[in-house]
Amino acid sequence: MSRSLGGRCASLLGRVLLLSFLISPARAGFVSQTIRNDTTQANDLTVQFVRGAVTSVVLSTDAGKVTGKVATDGMSATFATGDISVGPGKEPILKFEKKDQTQQVEVATSSMWSFQGVDIGSITKVGSPMGILFNTSTGQATATFFDNETFAVTYSNIQMFRDNNIANLNIDQFDVPTGTQVTGLPVSITLQPGQSMTLSFGVVNPQGYELASADAAATGTPNDLFRIESAAAVPEPASLPLLVIGILGVFGCGLGIDSMKDDLRARGAGRPACRG
């Protein structure tokens, strides 16, 4: 078999690059969403998620910020009895970090308020987090608004900021814009159940992150607003080239992973590890 990529050295490089691609984690995305307690006094909350997993969850109430315990599978989170206090009509802010920013994770309507460990009713929410996607060939980013409800949803006060400071891409700071506000956006959009609409951030700086926010309301009750914010960064650069080069290194040169260990042992023994 032909030793392309410059022989065993290139093969070794290819295998290293392939392994680095395989173990590279997907970048996370963040969501902030207003929820409401339309039941009685609650001191516990169980949050269920659909369409993807989360890694961390925080609830901000009048009394402060509380971190929830995320289940092993990332599909739910709980707050211990007494950790929170949310009265009737109160609207705390729920923030969560998605395990994979490409997944359209959202809070399920089955999420439940409790008092002293007894369920008292589901949370109230309207709207879905915006999905932020990146086109690496054009350098542009988009935010897609969804209606996953059974009724028409209106998104108003739409704001989008590109090239935000990447240092702020964390669960505490992502929703504070530091970038350039996108102009020319519609004042509001109304979607029917199952519909979606995509708006553009334009060309973005891969060293920053993108933030989209809006007030969501059932179209029939336009003043009953629920704030939603989504943030995401350009995926780690050069993943696809790394994969291609890695595959060439492994299969084009016809060497197994074990030979890489031999090469490393040879280097440690002072023998030349790479021979053309």
Image (cartoon, helix red, strand yellow):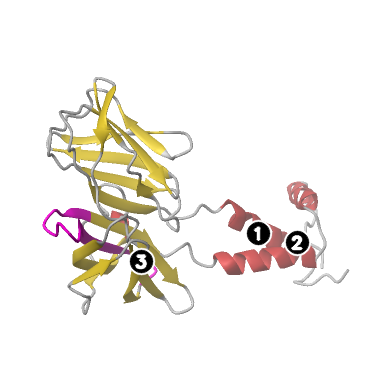
Q: Give the Cα distance between marks 3 and 1.
A: 39 Å
Q: Image quadrant for the N terminus? A: bottom right
Q: Which residue is mark 2?
A: 250
Above or below, 138 relative to 80: below
- Residue 237 got which mark? none
Q: Is residue 100 visible?
A: yes
Q: Please, what is the three-letter code of the amino acid marked with disc 2?
A: Val
Q: Which residue is mark 1?
A: 18
Question: Is the C-beta separation of discs 1 and 2 under 8 Å?
Answer: yes
Task: Report x, y in % for residue 42.
Answer: 19, 28
Q: Which residues are magenta?
A: 205-227
Q: Amino acid at mark 1?
A: Leu
Residue at coordinates 70% horizontally, 58% vertically from top-left? 15
Q: Horizontal and vertical percent for residue 160?
A: 25, 68
**What amino acid is labelled 3 in the image?**
Gln
**Residue 14 horizontal side relative to residue 275, left or right:** left
Left or right, 257 with reference to 158: right
Asked whether 206 falls inside the magenta stretch, the response is: yes
Q: Earlier in the sequence, mark 1 or mark 2?
A: 1
